[in-house]
Amino acid sequence: MSTWWLWILAALLCGIIEVMSVSFVFLMFAIGALAAGIAGAFGANLTVQVIVFIVVSIVLLVILRPFL
């Protein structure tokens, strides 16, 4: 089953939530979900997709969030 489109949908939903909340936390999750969706589109299995989502989201939260 191809799950990349679910990640893109999750990224879109996180983007919508971010627009309403303006906290810049959901933006990091949206980018992480987008990265996982791209990994899935290139054929990565679900485990790799979840790891990409977690790593990208945490790295963005740690690096960018303190400055926003």
Image (tube, grey):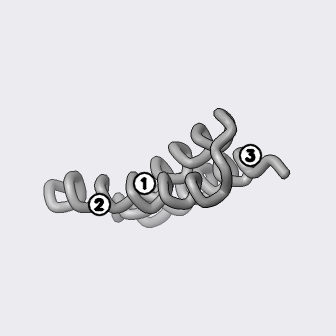
Q: Which of 68 and 41 is in front in this view?
A: 41
Left or right: 54 as drawn, with respect to 43: left
Q: What residue type is labelled 1?
A: Leu
- Circle nearer the N terminus (3, 2): 3
Q: What residue type is labelled 2?
A: Leu
User: Residue 39's quadrant in the figure?
Assistant: top right
Residue placed under numbered mark 1 in the picture: 27
Residue 44 place in picture, x, y as percent: 64, 44
The reply to whether the C-beta atoms of the residues labelled 1 and 2 are less than 8 Å apart is no
Q: What element carries label 3?
A: helix
Left or right: 57 as drawn, with respect to 49: left
Q: Is mark 2 on a helix, strand or loop?
A: helix
Q: How far apart are marks 1 and 3 (CA)?
A: 18 Å
Residue 10 place in picture, x, y as percent: 64, 57
Front tag of 1 and 3: 3
Residue 58 place in picture, x, y as percent: 34, 62
Task: Name the residue rendered at 55%, 52% in the picture.
Answer: 33
Q: Tell me, for residue 61, which label it has, or none.
A: 2
Q: Is mark 1 on a helix, strand or loop?
A: helix
Q: Nearer the viewer, residue 35 or 31?
A: 35
